Amino acid sequence: MKKYGIIIIIIIMALLLLSCSQQEEDETVRIWMYRYKDYYGDNELKDLMESRILYYAEENSIEIEVIVYTDDEMMEEDYMLKRNLALEHGDADIIIGDMRSGMHQTAKYVADYTKLSNYYNIFDNFKGQYFIPLTSAMDTIVLDKQVLEAYGIESDKYITLDEYYEIKQQLKAAGARFKYEAEEHQQLMSYYINKNDLKMMVENGQFTIDKQAAIKTAREIAEDIVKNYDTDIYTIKKEIVRNTNRDRIIYDEILGRPFSQRGQYQPLKFLSFTYDITPPFEDYVVVIENDLENTMLRVPCMIINKNSSKESTYKIADYLLSDKFQSSVYNNTLTYSTITDTPNVRRDTGYNDDRSYKYEPGKTKIYNTNLTGKDIKELMPVVQDAYELFKNTDTEKFFTPSEYRIAIRAFIGNEALKMVENPSYGEEDFNRSADEYLTRFNVLYN
């Protein structure tokens, strides 16, 4: 009997050793991706990423498994929970395709990105963070120059978002009255929150805000609403909760015409300015929208699981930052551009080393063949300005969880309305409301 017991123990030990050996030999790189509802070419990019990864893996004899979930089969919150468990248990080596909004939940699993040779090629303002955006994106807003001229306001052809917000304030001072719709509400919030540098902070492990900056912001918004908008509180409240209108049009009610509209151009891509499209206005100004936490909201982001010891994990991640892949993103997607800046990427995307655009008549690809040499000359400065703006934009807010921005905007918007409805709403009332808001926020996110 003793003899059989020894044999059984030996068999069990052998099986355990075999199991451990098989686990050690499991070199399959598991890549997780979430597909949101397609918007502005998102899935075009996801298809490109997946196909190029599969090709790279086959070419380099790397075993991979791409685990894809869609919002049709699983809500984003459920996916993130499942994703985080996979990271915890070592069942996910790389996360790609997730938007930045939920990436802060993965911060404790993040590997050392400096092990990637191509990590050093991404734009400096995106280095040293807990996730890596795999592409870049910027939007534009197009302004009707006739509206500017009607109020005696001058502007350059291409301006920044901050300059646009200041022009809107000048227009209101000159008599313009913008219709208070969801998009106008969003822009008004952004102007004053940015102006006062209002943001969520952490002190002694608790979330807080600068109350003086917060009450100043709310008061300025309330004063602006009372002075410059011919509307009622009911309409304002309705527009605050309504989703922003997709075409993002701002109307001037005095002239009875649109003043600004979301652009159809991507300023980091010269090619987008040659689409065969008709601008919304006969004579126009282009705003380079460098609010990266907004314009790069849907950019796919990557983390590498620090618990992954597979060499191939880093090879695949490095490939996604390679010149070859980054150039393919630029040339094969409608919206997205590169996150790396190397001589090869600049050359592949049509730029000189100084980021001036290298237009060669008859050779450079353009969509609208009716563009004249003069048209091209006028268009080229925008992509040069856009890249300069992109690489010098502060990315702190981009890497801050989006819940912080949403919460601050909601709080400030509600407080401003209290001040509009009740002119005697004072600092004591505001501080009490702020304390209640911060208590709730800390319960949710701390």
Image (cartoon, rainbow, N blue to C red):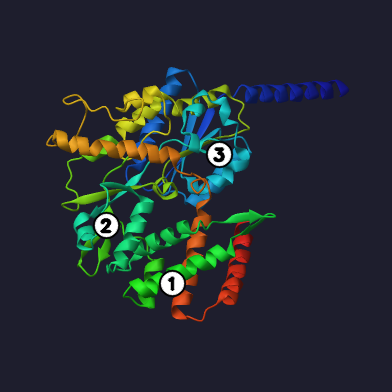
Whole-Å distance between the Cαs marked 1 and 3?
Answer: 36 Å
The residue located at (11%, 36%) in the rendering is: 370
Residue 336 appears in the rendering: no
For the residue marked with disc 3, what is the amino acid?
Gln
Whole-Å distance between the Cαs marked 3 and 2?
Answer: 35 Å
Image quarter for residue 34?
A: top left
Evaluate if marks 3 and 2 touch, with contact meaning CB atoms under 8 Å apart. no
For the residue marked with disc 1, what is the amino acid?
Ala
Label 3 SS: loop
Q: Which mark is residue 222?
A: 1
Quadrant assignment for the C terminus: bottom right
Horizontal side, residue 15 vs residue 341: left or right = right
Evaluate if marks 1 and 3 touch, with contact meaning CB atoms under 8 Å apart. no
Query: Where's residue 235, x and y in %?
Result: 35, 74
Total marks in image: 3
Query: Where's residue 249, x and y in %?
Result: 27, 59
Image quarter for residue 113?
A: top right
Name the front one of labels 1 and 3. 1
Q: Earlier in the sequence, mark 1 or mark 3?
A: 3
Q: Which mark is residue 201?
A: none
Q: Earlier in the sequence, mark 2 or mark 1?
A: 1
On screen, residue 272 above or below 202 = above
Label 2 SS: strand
Q: Which mark is residue 260?
A: 2
